Structures are given as C-alpha cells and as structure tokens.
Image: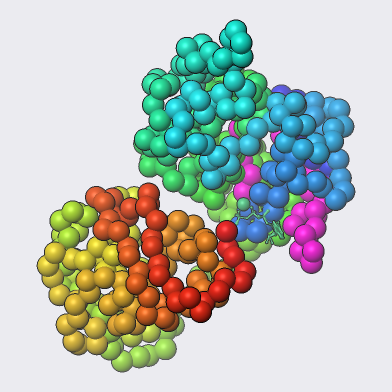
Amino acid sequence: MSKPILEYHSISKRFGGVQALCDVSFSVNKGDIHGLIGENGAGKSTLIKITGGIYRKDTGEMNWEGVPVEVNSPTDARRLGISIVHQELPLCDNLTIAQNVFMGQTITKSFGRPDWNLMEDKTVEIFEQMGQEVNPRQLIGDCSVAMKQLTAVAHALNSRSRFIIMDEPTAALTPGEVETLFEVLRKLKAEGTTILFVSHILSEIMTITDRITVLRNGRHVETKDTADTSIPEIIQMMVGSIPIATKKSHPARKEEVVLRVKNLNKASLGLKDINFVLNKQEILGIAGIQGAGRTELATCLFGVNPADSGIIELEGEPIDIQNPRQAIEHGIGYLTEDRRNLGIFWEMSVWQNMSTVMFHMKVKIPRADKAGLDRGRMIRVNIPNSLQPSMRLA
Ligand SMILES: Nc1ncnc2c1ncn2[C@@H]1O[C@H](COP(=O)(O)OP(=O)(O)OP(=O)(O)O)[C@@H](O)[C@H]1O
Ligand SMILES: [Mg+2]
C-alpha cells in the first residue's frame, strides 16, 4: 500500500455562525486518485481552499509526506507542489495556450525577452506527457471547455505540482471529453501524481478514484477504498439515511391544463415537433442526455429563441411569445442553468436584480447562436436613473 502524501488531523474551520469543517481527519495516499464527495455545503471547497493556502484553518494539523506543514498562502502550497484546478478556470481568453500554461512563470532569453519558441515547445511536451496533442499558439478564447481544463492542468504540471486538486472538473464537459480527462488523470497517476478529485457525479467517482472520502455537514464520515463500496452506500454516507420510498400520494386534483405545446419547431436549435401538456399544480420533468435540447426547449418557450412554428396555449388561449418580455407578461418565469453568466446582472445590486422584471425596461437580449445561448456578449439594460445601486453583486 502506498504511503500518505497528505494527512489531515482534526481540521476545523468556522465562518461566523457556520461550522464549515469540524474535526476532519483523513489521509490521501501518494499516487492515488482520491475522491472527495458530499452534498452541497458539506465542506469540500473549504477543505480544498485550506489545502491550497487560500483559507487558513482554525485548528488542526496537516502533514505533508509525514512532516507537519503550515500552508498559509497559495505560494506555500505551490512550494510543496500543490495546485488547485478551480471550476471557474483562471485563464486569459486573449492569450494562447502556451502563454496561459506559462502564466506567472515566463522563460526569458537575453535582455529579459520572453522565449516563446521554447515555451511553445515545452507546452507541447507537457501535453504529450498527458497523452494529448496541442497547438500551443491557439487562443484560449477559441478553445473548448475541455481544452481549457487541460490547459489548467498543464499549468499545474508546469509548476511541478505533484498534488493536483480538481474541483468538479467534469461539470461542463461532454461524455467524450470526460473520458479524455480521465485518460489524462490515469496517465498522471501512472507517473506518480496524486489527484484529489471533487465531484457530485457518483458514477464518475466510482470509475476514476482509488479511494473516497465522504464529508457531511463539515464532518468526516468515512474514507474507503472505492472497490469496497458502492453507489447506494456512498449515498447513505452522504445523506445519513436513505429516505424510504413510499407510494406517491398526490392529493386528488382535477386535471386543469395550464400549458399545452403543440408541434413546436425551432430548426436552428434542433427542436422538432415538440408536444406536451402541463397541468395545474404539476411538476413536469424534461429529461434527456446532454445536447438533447432541454435547455433549447426552455429558451424557446421563454422567447429567448422564439419558435419557427407550432402553438403554445396558456390556459386554453394560444399565445405569441417572441421575446422574454412577452413570456414574463404571460406569467412565465425562467431560471437559467448558467446563473453566473445569464441569470444575474453582476454590475447591479441585489434589489435591482430582484426588480428587473417588475419595471418596464428595455432589455436587449442577443439572438442566440446555434447552441441556443450566446454567452459572449453583454446583455444591455436601460434602467431608470432613479434606481441607484446599493449592494452590488460584482
Ligand atoms: N467564505 C465563506 N463565508 C461564509 N460561509 C462560508 C464561506 N465558504 C463556505 N461557507 C459555508 O461553509 C459551508 C461549507 O461550504 P463549502 O463551500 O465548503 O461546501 P461544498 O461541500 O464545497 O459545497 P458545494 O457542493 O455546494 O460546492 C457552507 O455552509 C457554506 O455556506
Ligand atoms: Mg464547493
């Protein structure tokens, strides 16, 4: 059995009235892919940030290769060889892959000029180490999320990291890209790199990890070999107990159609002949694999991408939804999956955000691209001058 590279002893951390971590002890073995899981708010990110020197623990100890260490800053973490690949990747879109890989560690030649040829060659070498091909001159802004993710890993490897923490790395990847990332992780593991892998997706945890640690409400529940556990057992550890499934007993209600969608089509989003009925007091789930058109259907109903043809009936009356304003006027609300980029106006205050739909404002929403969403451009909002920002979100 391999030796621990990092041991946590009784780590605790409190934020005001919230005990984010309480007496957490476990160890991560050298060369392992170690899964860290737990429900929202379990304390995973807090532990990661303490490991990476972003937060300071209140009490407890960390041992690095058997020796007690204090990690008081990201620089301390980097010195030990610890890197975090955050979910929100800190890359610069207007720089190339090589420039991002060498960010903060530029190689210079005479008179301090950057040696881009050398850095580009080295970028290719690092990607080769991960078993991937790369064009080091490609702009990061033009890369897929998967390539950005690999660039962040390459940056970590370039900093000679031996312990890479990945916070929900697969959240925005397609199944094929997840498989590529897993191949890279297996390759890094074979070369002796240790990986702490945070994910909510239990099937991924079961596939890629050697051991897992479960946190619940800031406490350590269990650390186990992945081969000795199962998804039901992990769920039990995460939630404490599994609610016993009982037969659904919805109160008897008269079926009253609220929304009826007939032969809805939107060719550019791949929506074809969509038909469904939503009754009053019903929760209707729309299921499908990634790319099946779930988000596209929602944006179509909300008027972000108005339908080409078809009928939308609200309480028996056909309605015309050509833009979100019309949808809102019909009492339809939409909570986007991409809350950070599309759900709020960062530059505005909480109360302004809450009241955006109440005032009659000119909201210019760009027509969506093929994927249904145009993430690149700003949404322009004209708000009355009388509304002064108080607490800002940004
Ligand atoms: N900077 C902070 N200030 C105040 N409370 C915080 C802060 N960071 C985390 N918390 C609180 O600490 C607890 C643990 O949060 P943490 O972000 O570590 O959980 P998590 O397991 O990463 O959850 P998720 O799966 O949602 O990312 C939560 O109750 C959270 O609200
Ligand atoms: Mg988190």
Majority secondary structure in the magenta region: strand
Q: Magenta stretch containing residue 16, yes or no?
A: yes
Bounds of the magenta segment: 11-37
Quarter of the image where one finds residue 136: top left
Residue 325 lies left or right of residue 233; in this view the side is left
- Please state the horizontal and vertical placement of residue 314, each as a whole percent of the image: 24, 83
Quarter of the image where one finds residue 251: bottom left
**Viewer-proximal residue among 52 and 351:** 351
**Viewer-proximal residue among 103 and 253:** 103
Residue depicted at x 55% and y 16%: 114
Image quarter (top left, top right, bottom left or bottom right) of the N terminus: top right
- Please state the horizontal and vertical placement of residue 173, each as a whole percent of the image: 42, 42
- The correct choice, above or below, for 91 with respect to 364 in the image is above
Does residue 186 show up? Answer: no
| Total numbered labels | 0
Residue depicted at x 82% and y 47%: 57
Residue farthest front in this picture? 385
**Viewer-proximal residue among 40 and 247:** 40
- The correct choice, above or below, for 234 with respect to 109 in the image is below
Residue depicted at x 26% and y 58%: 367
Q: Magenta stretch containing residue 230, yes or no?
A: no
Does residue 73 show up? Answer: yes
Image quarter (top left, top right, bottom left or bottom right) of the C terminus: bottom right
Residue depicted at x 19% and y 87%: 316
Residue 30 lies left or right of residue 341; in this view the side is right
- The correct choice, above or below, for 220 with respect to 157 in the image is below
- Please state the horizontal and vertical placement of residue 164, each as a whole percent of the image: 63, 32
Name the colouring of the figure: rainbow
**Viewer-proximal residue among 142 and 229:** 142
- Please state the horizontal and vertical placement of residue 36, each as a whole percent of the image: 64, 44
